[in-house]
Amino acid sequence: MNWVGELAAGITGQVLADEPSRENVATDFGRIVSRVPAVVVRPASAEDVARAVKFAAAHGVAVATRGAGHSQSGQSLSDGIVLDMTSLAGLASIEEKTGDLRGTSTAVCGGGLKWRALVEQLAPLSLSPPVLTNNLDVTVGGTLSTAGLGVTSWRRGTQADHCLELEVVTGAGEIVRCSEDSNRDLFDAVRAGCGQFGVITEATLALRRHQPEFRSYYLLYDDLGALLDDSKTLMAEERFDYIESWCAPCVQGLRKVGAERQPFAQWFYPLHLTVETDGRYIAPDPGEKLQGLRFYKHIHTEDGEISEFFARLDPLFALWKRGGFWEYAHPWMECVLPWQATAFYITQVLGNLPPQAIAGGHVLLWPARGNASRVPLFMRPPGEHLMGFGILSAFPKHLVADALPRLNQASAASMMVGGKRYLSGWVAFDAAQWKAHYGDLWPTVVELKKKYDPKGILNPGFLKVG
């Protein structure tokens, strides 16, 4: 019996070794790295995950954990075993605390559950997670293991901050429950741990009660400094529940760069500010909500049901898919910047970013309070305020070789000004860069890897501890 057959004999769920199943998980959203696994395991339980991991450790086989496959550096790929966690997509329970506005209602769900399914099942109760990613078709376990950011992160931190308890299968194949009060080192390792220390099979998540409707103000800025100043004001005064912003190019034509002419742009900065309403709310004159802000233009105001807001980017994703951009390579470069370096860094990076580089993508900004998150492995600079910046690009495969050096330069520059990379995107760190990324926490990371993945089988090749 070959090792695939031996593995299958101990698994209750599906073990798929046919070529279509293996090819279906051979690449990720980044579409830069490809690895065809020997086998795909769709576990029926945490026990199945434990059996697969123990088998892999005993045979020296690499294991990758895969949810929606939204990674970009090959974290969800393996030439050994791919654990397709979407088979663990159940919602085990919802505990509702009626009238509680502090987020102590809870949901217990499988690590492979997609956020969209959770949001839809919570909607009749007027409950939702405190932080939601822009793309709802990613999994709970996937985003918890990168931290998980959204347009409430400015004050609510990451999705991992609102995780109360986890069931985890370690790299040694042990099933462990962990929280702030039990097995704390594993709890802190797995949240934002990029799948390096264990496999999330179940999560208990804090929920909050939301209002039924929303109002959004669409503002446009032509001055980055004004946007930054206003962002600090908005975070301090808490006028709005949701803050989201972009950098948008207005193409000006072609200019000489050396011996060539290349497209260039004037950059503008849309800012969308959203407040939840109770449905009976009659909005005051916009001047009251927007008083003192130094925007260039108030473009639009929109009202709707809160479910529309949670899924507001679905039409954009549909356009990208129709236009073929979804199938492009997506080497995203996301970082968290110290506030004092933000204006200089963004101005320099955008000045050298060809506007065509973000076709089928965009450049994100997300201001945040420096103390909004308490997740240890979500690395960010010190400071009262921080700025997230992300070049969410899409390229045809034949242009990737030209694009990666520019993105790697932007990544290196972010670290030179004191920033930290957000690890959901394209990360091509060597061992020295990983050590610098974690700084004083690096010895702890190394020890946790040895403790919880002693054979180094979980998502190998990403985090370089040697």
Image: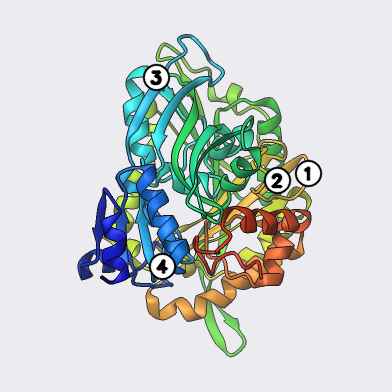
**Residue that protrudes farthest toward the front in the picture:** 1
Q: Which residue is mark 1?
A: 383
In three-dimensional space, the C-alpha distance between marks 2 and 1, rounded to whole angstroms, equals 7 Å
Q: Residues within 10 Å of mark 1 (few under 14, many from 20)?
A: few
For the residue labelled by badge 4, is the local secondary structure a helix, a strand or a loop?
Answer: loop
Q: Which residue is mark 4?
A: 78
Which of the marked residues, 3 or 1, is nearer the chain's N terminus?
Answer: 3
Which of the marked residues, 4 or 2, is nearer the chain's N terminus?
Answer: 4
In three-dimensional space, the C-alpha distance between marks 2 and 3, rounded to whole angstroms, equals 31 Å
Establish if 99 lies above or below 372: above
Q: Which residue is mark 2?
A: 386
Which of the marked residues, 2 or 3, is nearer the chain's N terminus?
Answer: 3
Picture quadrant of residue 2: bottom left
- 47, 462: nearer the viewer: 47
Position of residue 420 measured from the top left corner of the image (x, y, whole percent):
68, 56
Please give the name of the residue rendered at 36% of the width and 41% of the height, measured from the top-left corner: 114
Determine whether label 2 and label 1 are within 8 Å by CB: yes
In three-dimensional space, the C-alpha distance between marks 3 and 4, rounded to whole angstroms, equals 40 Å
Q: Which amino acid is tagged 4?
A: Ser
Q: Which amino acid is tagged 2?
A: Leu
Q: Residues within 10 Å of mark 4 (few under 14, many from 20)?
A: many
Determine whether label 3 and label 4 are within 8 Å by CB: no
Q: Residues within 10 Å of mark 2 (few under 14, many from 20)?
A: many
Relative side of 61 to 103, left or right: left
